Amino acid sequence: MAIWLMKSEPDAFSINDLKHRQRENWDGVRNFQARNYMREMAKGDIILFYHSSCKVPAIVGTAIVSKTAHPDPSCWDPKSPYYDPKSTAETPRWVQVELAFESKLTKPLTLTLLKSWPELDGFPLTKKGSRLSVMPVDEPYWHILKPHILSQS
DNA sequence: GCCAACGTTGGC
DNA sequence: GCCAACGTTGGC
């Protein structure tokens, strides 16, 4: 079982939205590296839900992968902001995964806090200039984060 | 709103 | 295959 972190702008889709919907397809990813990580996800993997581009960027909850990568239909919709004419029915370029809500943290782990932990040096999220919206949480980092997250779940 | 960092595109 | 130009992300 692997651990991943996924970013979302809360104005577009927040942890509360996921809590309300319970399950949601994570569509609109248009970055190859992020897509490749989504393809690696297995059912049951843990997702750390991160709020980006907002007042207090933070890990705000968790979710579970409930459906593995499958074509993201928004890439075929000309009216969608995620429309990609280079994606065809034969060779879908983009995928989505389905997530199931798991928990909302009462005390989110803010980016400021995470940056203050020396043990997290090298973690992609806290690296300067990291814009990746889907990233693996490698074992050493999960080891550090786990107690702070699972104790709240 | 600014801007640094990064990814993608397309001309050559 | 290089790289300049452009677009986007996301913290501040």
Image (cartoon, coloured by chain):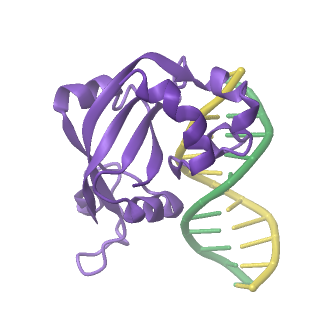
Chain colours: A purple, B green, C yellow
The answer to whether residue A53 is left or right of residue A112 is: left
Relative height, residue A117 to residue A77 (above, below): above
Instruction: Give the x, y percent position of residue A80.
Output: 28, 50
Q: In which quarter of the image is residue A115?
A: top right
A126 vs A75, nearest the viewer? A126
Q: In which quarter of the image is residue A9?
A: top left
Relative height, residue A51 to residue B11 (above, below): above
Residue name at image x 45 percent, y 48 percent: A3
A45 vs A111, nearest the viewer? A45
Q: In which quarter of the image is the N terminus of chain A?
A: bottom left
A47 vs A84, nearest the viewer? A47
Q: Quadrant of residue A67?
A: bottom left
Q: In which quarter of the image is the C terminus of chain A?
A: top left
Residue at the top extreme, as displayed: A106
The answer to whether residue A129 is left or right of residue C9 is: right
Instruction: Give the x, y percent position of residue A78.
Output: 26, 58
Question: How many numbered marks does the figure carry?
Answer: 0
Res. A109 visible in picture: yes
Residue name at image x 40 percent, y 20 percent: A152
Instruction: Give the x, y percent position of residue A96.
Output: 30, 56
The answer to whether residue A15 is left or right of residue A4 is: left
Residue name at image x 25 percent, y 63 percent: A76
Instruction: Give the x, y percent position of residue B2.
Output: 74, 27
Relative height, residue A65 to residue A19 (above, below): below
Res. A60 visible in picture: no
